Each structure stands twice: as C-alpha cells, then as structure tokens.
Amino acid sequence: MFDMSEKKVDRRTWIATVAAAIGGLAVGAAAGYFATPREVLEKMITTTVEKIETKTVTVTGSPPKPEEELIRWWKEASKPYSGTTIKVLAQAWEPNFYLRDVVGPKFTELTGIKIDWELTSNELVMEKEILDMERGTGIYSSTYDDQDMVGTWIRKGWTYDYTKLMDEHPELIEPAFNPDDIFPLPYCKDAKGHILSIPAEYFPKTYIYRTDLFESPKEKEDFRKKYGYELRPPRYYDEMLDIAEFFTRPPDLYGFIGADGAKAHEALGFDFFETWFPSCGATGEGLDPYPRDLLPGWGINTKTWSSRMENGGALDSPQAVRAIETFLKWLPYAPPGVRAMIYVESGEQQAAGKVAQAITYTQFLSTYANPELSKIAGKFRVTLPPVDREYWRPYMPIGYADISGYTIPWCSPHPEAAFLWAQFVISPLNELERAKAINTTVRTSVLTNPALDPLDAKFGGVFSLIRDPIARKYFVGTPLEIGDYAPLLYVFYTTLAKAVAGELTPKECANELARAIDEELVKLGYK
C-alpha cells in the first residue's frame, strides 16, 4: 500500500486511493505521487500506465436500458418538442464537428428537434454567450462552453439550474442519465451541489512526445553522450529543455512547443495558469479536494482576495517568476513564428511532425492519430506533464483538465429541448462510439469499457492515463471561486504578453501581474 507516513492525506483522498487499489485499477506512475516526498522526487513522474485491468463499474441510480428501449423512450419523451429548433453556440473544432455531423442528425431523427449550429472561436463563444445572458436576448437555446465559466454562472446567476429543471421535469430525465457516472461533474456544480453544466468533454492537458525519436537507438545513444542520462519523457522542466535543445534541428524539426503558442492572445493566459504556474507548485498541498485558500494556477488567496504574497497570494512569488522564466526559455526551441501562434497553429505544428515534444490539449489527438491529416500517426504517446524541480511538491496539482459541456442560458427560448440535447450527447446510444472517434468521454462506465483497449495506442495511451484514478486527480479544472473568468483572463494575457515581447523581465512581469489582478478584483467587487 502507499506510504503516507510523512504527509497528511485527507480521508477522502485516502479512501479513493485504497478503493482504486482494491478495485484492480492499475495506478501506474501516479502511485508514486503518494510515496514519501524523497521517493517521489527520485521517481519519474511522467510514465504512463502501460497495462490496465478494466472492470465493469457499478453506479447508483437506474441501470442503462437496452438500446431499443432507450430509443423508444427518446421518441416518446421528445414528442412535445418535435419541430422545435434549438440554436447551439460552440467552439469550432473537431469534437464539436463530430457532434454536429454525427450525433446531431441522429438526435433530430429520433426527436424531431432540429439544431442550428453556430461554431466559432473560443473567445467569441465566451463573448457571445455573456452578451446574450447579460442582455437577456434569448438568441441561444444552449451554449457549449468551457467549465472555466461555471464560476461566472454561479456568481452571476445567468444559467438554468439543471437540478431544479430535473425536479420540475422528471419525465425528461433519460433512464440511463446517471450523474454518479459523470466523473468531471464536481467541477460543474455550485456550493449546494446543483448542476449548472452537463459535461460532454474531458481533455487533460498532457505532455506528448514522438516515440519514433525517443525510442530510436541512435538518438538515445547520442543524447546519453551529450547529457549524461537516458532519453525519456522528462520528469522536470530542466530535462524538458535539454530534450528541446537536443532535437532542435531547423528547418524540419524543433524541440518543443506549448499548447497555446505565444501570441498576445487569451491563449497566452491559458498556458500560464493551466500549465506553467501550477506545475511550479503555486498552491497548497492536496488533491481531492484541492486547496481552496490559494487557487491552483491563479495564485489568488480567497480569504484576502489578493494575489500578492504580502496578503497570502502568489502571483508575485518566486514560483510565478520561475513559471514565466520557464515559459520564455522554451521559445528559442519552437518553430519559427511561434509568437504569432495560438492553440490551433500550435496543434498544426505537432501534426506536421515538426516538434519532438509538446504540452498539448488532447482534443487534438484524434487529428494526430489520423494518417490522412498527420505525419505522427502511430508515432506519439502522452503522459503526465513535467514539473519544476525546485518548487513543485507531491500532492500538488500539476496541470489542467479541459472540461466542456452544455449550459442553458437563463433566457433560453427552449430550455427543455436543450436539456434533452445535453443528455443525448452522453447517452449510451452515443458515448462509446464518440469515445472511439474523438478520444474523450465523461462517463466512468465508458472509460473503463474494454472496447476502448484496442484504440488506446492509436490515441497515444490517453485512455490508460485517465483511467488511472490517481493520475486524473492531478489535472484540475478552473476553480469555481473564479467568478469573473473573462475580465481576469484579459489581465493575465495582456500582462504576460509584455514579458514575451521583452518589455518586462519575468520578475517585473510577476509584480505587475499581481498588482493588476488585485486592482481588477477590487473593481469586480471581491473586496
């Protein structure tokens, strides 16, 4: 069993850990996180699970019905809404193309409810849904947005409460809809446990590497001669930078790229508080639940509502400076033009085989696995991201889980039909096939289904990684205390852009960021 003699672990985490071991789920590399600190720091924390024993997960609530019975239920329950058109706002990328092209037509055929899709950029989804809810225009029946916004919906009260909606319309609850089976759901609830968004997407932000390069005998020998240790997925950022230097061979191969490029764009803020800052230990210790006093990735103290060290915050801390320094250090090893890239362009560089390693959104894995679109199909693997050697400690979050789902605006013209659609997306009628197609699921029963085993290698081992219940805890969503995501994000990326442009040193940038965030918190009424 795990040695917890040197660390206090809350009862909930301990129970989850023991239950995972008893249940037969291999915890692989993640088990190392629960060893003593010295042992952990000597182990490679980024090894993925190579073999996993799957089992049937028993969940509470009504058991899933046979497909024929579910189809009959959908046809009957949707009759009052047949002929309705719901307008759905969502981000334009592959997971939503799949919903539009495959799941949507199936839904319309069964229910008679049509979907008018508006697919656009992430920033415009955020802007349009906020304007719609703020003004009460009722343009959108449903918005497919990031879990990042749930804290905003809690603070503003702008969305339907799914829990109340289900109480009012029990006849619209699919027999197979089971909240206990939706593992990212805790990030989508308010303090009362009411559901504000139904997750449909879980994509951890992982480290990805080219196996054809990392497993090449010649590359391994040359690397060992130059750096004095074995070429493998890195434990720490200094090792990642060695690998980046080693594989930077312009014009065809470069050593590293981040998930979000380096453009003065909202994505710059994402990379900081989703990757670099949390992996520099910018929070207290604890995973389930993670610390609420000092929000991971954000550096904001929720007791003082300040991001400055003097008030218990961390945005002007040595960890913040280190995070900015590390971010800047990888830029020389990235493909040309990285300062004009955001996540889409960054993903294109990876698919083109131009980088040896990256930290990326796993939304892109289905593209990387497609030999018609990618030069690295069959030649990549994902694992836990590296961390800062000095500041990160065991029991701290290390990265971000990108959780997206369906929110119903308070002014939605068709909330009941929108609720049906949100359920249908993750219905047993669709969820396993969706997981096979685009490497994501939000249901434990699907994640542990042996039918995904043959596809695990195709998607770089991502199913094995997130099946590990301990490893999954190291990826956290946006803290629900962040009740004004959009304006705070603006402060982050506009300030960080000054460091990327060379206008501020990392220390100057950290100080200005803490000052600017504190000023914004005052304006927004947090203190």
Image (spheres, grey):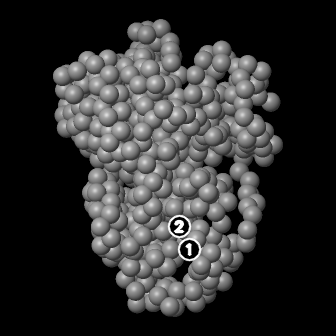
Percent across and percent down for residue 188 are 53, 55
Percent across and percent down for residue 481 are 49, 45
For image coordinates 28% across by 19% down, the residue present is 508
Mark 1: which secondary structure?
helix
Between 180 and 352, the one nearer to me in the picture: 180
Mark 2: which secondary structure?
loop
Residue pointed to by mark 2? 161
Numbered badge on residue 237: none
Q: Which amino acid does label 2 sit on?
A: Asp
Position above or below: 226 against 508: above
Badge 2 crowding class, 10 Å Cα cut-off, few under 14, some 14 to 19, many 20 or more, is many
Label 2 and label 1: CA atoms lie apart by 6 Å
Badge 1 crowding class, 10 Å Cα cut-off, few under 14, some 14 to 19, many 20 or more, is some
Percent across and percent down for residue 33 are 65, 28
Position above or below: 164 against 37: below
Residue pointed to by mark 1? 165
For image coordinates 58% across by 90% down, the residue present is 76
For image coordinates 37% across by 83% down, the residue present is 85
Q: Do the residues labelled 2 and 1 touch (CB within 8 Å)?
A: yes
**Residue 358 visible:** no
Q: What residue type is labelled 1?
A: Leu
Q: The C terminus is located in which quarter?
A: top left
